[in-house]
Image: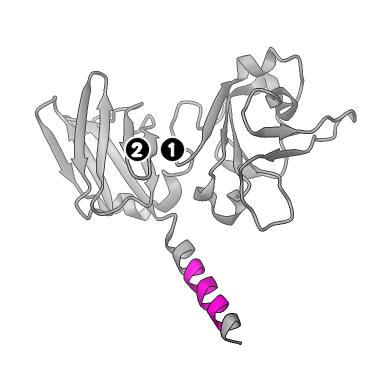
Amino acid sequence: MKTFYSFLILVSLSLGMYAQSGVPFNGMILDANGAPLKNIHIYVQNPRKYSRTNKLGRFGLTDVKATDTLKVVVKKHTYYIPVANKKSIKIYLADERQVRIEEDKALVDFGYGFVKRRENTGVSNGISGEELRRSGYTDILSALQGRIPGLNVGANGNAGVEPSVSMRGTNSFMLSQTPLFVVDGIIVDTLMGISLMDVDHVEVLKDASIYGSRGANGAILVTTKHGPSNDNGK
């Protein structure tokens, strides 16, 4: 009985820790005049996280600690911005010597809106649509086979049927081993309806915890040429 209660306590603690994970931290990077700066790289160490700004200057991360420091890389200049207990951050970059920082509650209200597809918390691999089309296949999953380390795509001889897919190294208590499919920021059940000719690029996330339990098996993120994420904007 004692062992059973100890097990329950461990499960409760684990659930509590899981519930606290995935907290969004949204930010924005602007120039001195308030114009957004896109494709700016932002890093956080221990554990390493990465994001970049979209066309509106926005970026998203998860589980940023109050004591963390953001490493912001703009061309040849690197800025070190302390989080200092902020829930969100707006950064104005005038030049390499002048930086203005403020907290913006409006960014907090967006929740995961900026975070999705902006953060790389684990193993991520990207491949262009052009390279996938050179594979000779007509569907996305078959074209990915052999091109992404750890991604297993089953052979499929039936036309119109999606091949099985799984990712080595993902941990899941769910029966299915199929990763999450996300097209232009929208979770979908299948990739069969997406023409390979329309694909701009594909990212494969081994750690897709940003999507909660749905991302327990990793995620395959497809950006189309016409999708809202193709210009890094949302």
Do the CB atoms of the residues marked 2 and 1 lie less than 8 Å apart? yes
Q: Nearer the viewer, residue 82 or 167?
A: 167
Residue 56 seen in the current view = yes
Q: Residue at x 47, y 71 (%)?
A: 13
Structural crowding at the residue carrying mark 1, measured as other residues with C-alpha within 10 Å and reported as few (<14), some (14–19) or many (≥20): many
Q: Secondary structure at mark 1?
A: loop
Q: Position of residue 154 (x, y in %)?
A: 79, 33
Q: Residue at x 77, y 21 (%)?
A: 138
Q: Which mark is residue 160?
A: none
| Mark pair 2, 1: CA separation | 9 Å
Query: In the displayed structure, does residue 32 sit left or right of residue 175?
Result: left
Structural crowding at the residue carrying mark 2, measured as other residues with C-alpha within 10 Å and reported as few (<14), some (14–19) or many (≥20): many
Which mark is in front, 2 or 1? 1
Task: Tally the marks.
Answer: 2
Rendering quarter of residue 179: top right
Q: Residue at x 32, y 34 (%)?
A: 42
**Which kind of residue does numbered mark 2 sit on?**
Arg
Which residue is at the far right?
Answer: 158
Name the residue that disc number 1 marks: 118
Q: Residue at x 54, y 50 (%)?
A: 211
Q: Which residues are magenta?
A: 5-15
Q: Position of residue 59 (x, y in %)?
A: 36, 39
**Which kind of residue does numbered mark 1 sit on?**
Arg
**Image quadrant containing the N terminus:** bottom right
Q: Is residue 149 found inside the magenta-colored segment of the image?
A: no
Q: Nearer the viewer, residue 112 or 132?
A: 132
Which residue is at the far top?
Answer: 134
Name the residue that disc number 2 marks: 58
